[in-house]
Image: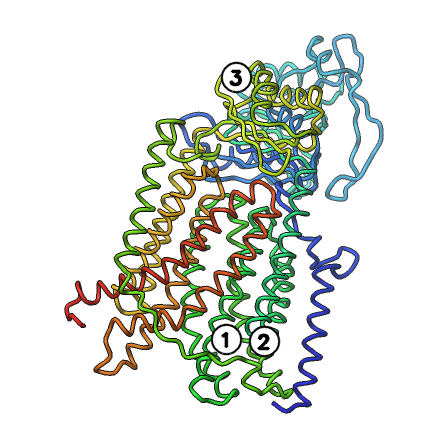
Amino acid sequence: MKKSRAVISLIVYILILGLLGYTAVFGVGADKSGSAGSIKLGLDLAGGVSITYQVVGDEEPSSEDMGDTIYKLQQRVDGYSTEAQVYQEGKDRINIEIPGVSDANAILEELGKPGSLYFIAQTDSNGNNNYDLIGYGIDAGGNLAPQYQLNKTMEELMADGSIVLDGTKVEDAQAKARQDNMGNLENVVELTFNADGKEAFAEATKKAYDNGETIAIYYDGEFVSVPNVQAVITDGSAIITGQHSVEEAQQLASTIRIGGLKLELEELRSNVVGAQLGSAAIETSLKAAAVGFALVIVFMVAVYYISGLAAALALCLYTELLVILLYAFEATLTLPGIAGIILSVGMAVDANVIIFARIREELATGKTVQSSIKIGFQKALSAILDGNITTLIAALVLYFMGSGTIKGFSITLMLGIFLSMFTALFVTRFLVNVFFALGVQSEKAYGVAKEKKPINFLSKRFVFFGISVSVILIGFIVMGVNSSQIGMPLNYSLDFVGGTSTTMTLNEDMSIEDIDAQIVPHVEDITGDGNVQTTKVAGSNQIIIKTRTLNVDEREQFADLMANNFGVDKNSITAETISATISSEMQTSAVKAVLISTVLMLLYIWFRFKDIRFGASSVIALVHDVLVVLAFYAVVRISVGNTFIACMLTIVGYSINATIVIFDRIRENLREMGRKEDLQDLVNKSITQTLSRSIFTSLTTFFMVAALEVFGVSSIREFALPLMAGIICGTYSSICLTGAMWYVFRTKLGQKKEK
């Protein structure tokens, strides 16, 4: 590349960086398309309410019944928020998400009331109108539609017999097309009544026909149709005409059907997040991202000089593209999703560290800078691909087995994986070549790897094995002690045991003793639960109170108690309820997710390295890391909740990633090994050669996660702290255990013993 072309390339890159940065911050157009502020926020960030219902009964509901129920609930929640969503989960569950609402408890109470459908006579027994035509408007299809208004309350209509029948008397309602008297096709709704409905409707239509009246179909406070009665209907069926389109007929038929559904729904899980808490989560997460990002940039430039500067510029592009892609894919950003973004930034540096270490090694052999850059990227490729693919496996398992918030984490992680490979293999390479063409050609600007005497890690392998076994045994002992003291080996959250968790921020700092003395007795009076658990978030006035499962009324009483007696802002209160059914499924999913990802990674490593001993060593190290982190959970008593699965699988992916770099170097050195070179020396040399990569990558990822721990809200800290332990453990196992285990398998269990 010529110098003039390099100058133009750098200017164009900086302009693109600025343009994408502007788009990521401010967006494009009036709707700010592409900006971070335009990304759809999950309930944990926007505030709001989510609830999961399950159909009661042993029989599986039909798809039609489920569809009608979803439609009914969607009609109900649309009035609360234009971004409200109702969707099916599995065969018999329905999820509702309503972001941005303030009085979430009132919404939960209203959602618990089934919608009602009524057929109302035009006049009562005294000839007074029950409803009147008040004008005309435009319906959703753009057609002129009459507007009606009730003259009485529903109670008055029921009392004087004006409600001729309700939705439970409707057996079926179907949209159909038929020929009218002129031979033209018309869209109609065909009704079928049960025995009680047949008799009541015959009587009502006789009165209406004799007097030239209508019968209104009234659902959920609105007139959905007011047809004229053109005949006395005695056969238990009726036709409603006047529908302008197939869609209009189908909607009316569905509305009539859902007014009489027999499905009974029970609440499995609900979550109420105050808008202020969501705003605080965004603010603290952004602060964590900024601090972590700055630390990574400074570290890369300080350690890798001009290559580090290229990586920093590529990392800026990576971050901007990630924001824009989240908007483009219409991803819902959740709190775990933000954690995934911050974590992925730290992991994105990994590929650059591998490449730059390779470049320095090539320079140390006497090659030119240009040749070292080319060979360094080539030799780093296999380790980068293998490491990212194994992490991608963990992210895919999370996506298919996790819940909504964990899926958000997996999506950001997957996007981060693809973008990190793109920026490292193409953008960073482009920038390094640009700087070289601009005249930065001195070896000092890139750094030359110093000759390192191999560290004899294998001589201490039994010490390392003993340390690992001891830590794992301590973990099991602590789990046993926890089981005897609190009835659980780990500090399971509601996701795993069920119940209601209420999080709030007090106006003053109270000790646990004060909380137990002043607040808990009131909570026990409301709930009747003598086993109320309290937790205080370190460094803040935030407290978490766990009780048995509370209904809507009890939750409202609890919120009123805290607002009236302790001055807590109701908008800052978050309440989450998980049923025993959901918690049991969460435990099963956690075990399945770890097992499935482990097996898939083993198969991939076996396929790539053509040696089961590499795969077996990796899996043992992986299980080791999981057990050590479990021990950390047990000793520190960190809450084991929904993010536990994400944390474990992230550690699994990270551990495998670090291990693969060492195995890739062992494989490379095996090809070049002389006949007289000792296998133990080869393994020690391979570990030593990759030591700086292992430590530096851990540091950059640790910076990002540590920022989350320092600045994040409590739920993010529960994710960040064990992840920090996992990073340390994964680094230790990849350096001290994996190479040693492979050596043992190779020399003791292989067909061919080597010295």
Dividing the picture into quarters, in which one does residue 246 lie? top right
Residue at image point 40% right, 47% down:
629
Pick the quarter of the image with the N terminus.
bottom right
Few, some or many C-alpha atoms within 10 Å of disc 3 (few <14, some 14-19, many ≥20)? some
Disc 3/disc 1 C-alpha distance (Å): 81 Å
Q: Secondary structure at mark 2?
A: helix
User: In this view of the protein, which residue sits in the foreground, 721 or 71?
Assistant: 721
User: In this view of the protein, which residue sits in the foreground, 294 or 657?
Assistant: 294
Few, some or many C-alpha atoms within 10 Å of disc 1 (few <14, some 14-19, many ≥20)? many
Callout 3 amino acid: Ala
Callout 1 amino acid: Phe
Q: Which residue is mark 1?
A: 356
Callout 2 amino acid: Tyr
Residue at image point 76% right, 20% down:
212
Label whose residue precedes the other's in the sequence (2 or 3)? 3
Q: Secondary structure at mark 3?
A: helix
User: In this view of the protein, which residue sits in the foreground, 352 or 74?
Assistant: 352
Q: Secondary structure at mark 1?
A: helix
In contact (CB < 8 Å): disc 3 and disc 1: no
Q: Which residue is mark 3?
A: 195
